[in-house]
């Protein structure tokens, strides 16, 4: 996936209010009520972690999960490509009694960080945007450091992908073999994550998190909003018939929901817990 496509997909998160709304829709419609970030941290040795990096931090959802679990004197740095997240991330840090800082210059900021500096790096739903940065993550971790990463499994949102592809066929529009979302997720998922991480960490463990979003006949407004937010993931940038395709999708969803047919979206994730950074292999 080229850089322009990656930028187009990540840009949908620039609308902070809509991002928060979609987050709330996901929470309401999830069948698994245990937050994936809380689940990711269960059983990990966290009390000694004092220097932490939240990579692709967004509003600080992963940082919020650290509340009460780490040293109260810990300092956490958030890195994201959207500068507008700064006040929201720092507000999260205050709410969990952590000293926070924020860099809004994107993942390249990690290149300026000193080696062997952090006790822990956390990253949720972002590493598929920049998997090439994995060696740098290992570089900035202390020998006892921990990297905890949450990513989507490769079956994530298959129902949405199939619905969009089916609508494209119904409209007699030339199909694409892969939608942007599929290309993005395939850069770092449950299938290749271990192979990408293991050259840089001697110990890589996996945890599966099973979830789905369920929408019934009263939920069409939320489902329509969810699809509209995700549209750049399912259709190539500037697709000349994107609106027609999404209209077709929305019509089918509304008809099915009114007929009592639930719409279920697979939302399975994989958590990678990495330790023992292989410092001899690290990037300079």
Image (cartoon, grey):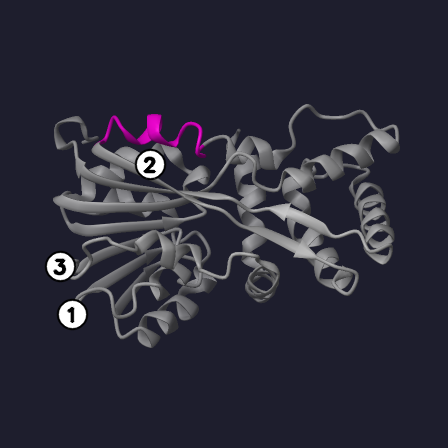
For disc 3, the marked residue is: 48
Q: Determine if the magenta segment contains residue 200.
A: yes
For disc 2, the marked residue is: 133
Q: Secondary structure at mark 1?
A: loop
Question: What residue sits 79% from the left and 33% below the top?
Answer: 166
Q: Can I make out residue 104 in this image?
A: no
The answer to whether residue 34 is above or below residue 173 is below
Horizontal side, residue 126 vs residue 278: left or right: right
Q: Position of residue 213 (x, y in %)?
A: 62, 53
Question: What residue sits 34% from the left and 30% below the top?
Answer: 194
Which residue is more in the foreground, 199 or 262? 262
Which residue is more in the foreground, 253 or 217? 217
Q: Can I make out residue 271 in this image?
A: yes
Q: Nearer the viewer, mark 3 or mark 2?
A: 3
Q: Nearer the viewer, mark 2 or mark 1?
A: 1
Span highlighted in magenta in the image: 188-201
Q: Mark 3 vs mark 2: which is more N-terminal? A: 3
The answer to whether residue 70 is above or below residue 13 is below
Q: Position of residue 142 (x, y in %)?
A: 13, 45
For disc 1, the marked residue is: 73
Q: Secondary structure at mark 2?
A: helix
Q: Nearer the viewer, mark 1 or mark 3?
A: 3
Question: Neighbour class for label 2 at 10 Å: few (<14), some, many (≥20)?
Answer: some
Question: Neighbour class for label 1 at 10 Å: few (<14), some, many (≥20)?
Answer: few
Give the CA distance from mark 2 to mark 1: 28 Å
Horizontal side, residue 157 vs residue 111: left or right: right
Horizontal side, residue 243 vs residue 51: left or right: right
């Amino acid at each position: 996936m080229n850089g322009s496509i990656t930028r187009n997909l990540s840009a949908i998160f620039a609308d902070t209010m809509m991002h928060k709304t979609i987050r709330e829709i996901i929470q309401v419609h999830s069948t698994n009520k245990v937050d994936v970030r809380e689940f990711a941290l269960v059983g990990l040795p966290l009390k000694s972690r004092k220097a932490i990096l939240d990579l692709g931090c967004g509003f600080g959802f992963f940082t919020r999960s650290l509340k009460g679990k780490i040293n109260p004197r810990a300092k956490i740095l958030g890195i994201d490509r959207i500068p507008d997240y700064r006040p929201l991330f720092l507000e999260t840090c205050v709410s969990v009694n952590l000293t926070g800082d924020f860099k809004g210059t994107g993942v390249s900021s990690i290149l300026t960080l000193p080696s062997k500096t952090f006790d822990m790096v956390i990253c949720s739903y972002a590493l598929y945007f920049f998997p090439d940065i994995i060696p740098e993550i290992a570089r900035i971790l202390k020998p006892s450091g921990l990297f905890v990463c949450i990513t989507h499994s490769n079956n994530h949102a298959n129902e949405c992908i199939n619905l969009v592809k089916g609508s494209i066929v119904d409209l007699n529009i030339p199909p694409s073999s892969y939608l942007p979302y599929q290309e993005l997720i395939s850069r770092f998922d449950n299938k290749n994550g271990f192979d990408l991480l293991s050259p840089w960490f001697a110990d890589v463990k996996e945890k599966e998190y099973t979830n789905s979003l369920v929408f019934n006949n009263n939920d069409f407004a939320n489902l329509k909003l969810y699809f509209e937010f995700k549209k750049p993931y399912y259709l190539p940038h500037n697709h000349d018939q994107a609106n027609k395709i999404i209209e077709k999708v929305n019509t089918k969803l509304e008809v099915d929901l009114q007929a009592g047919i639930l719409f279920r979206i697979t939302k399975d994730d994989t958590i990678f817990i990495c330790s023992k950074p292989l410092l001899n292999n690290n990037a300079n």
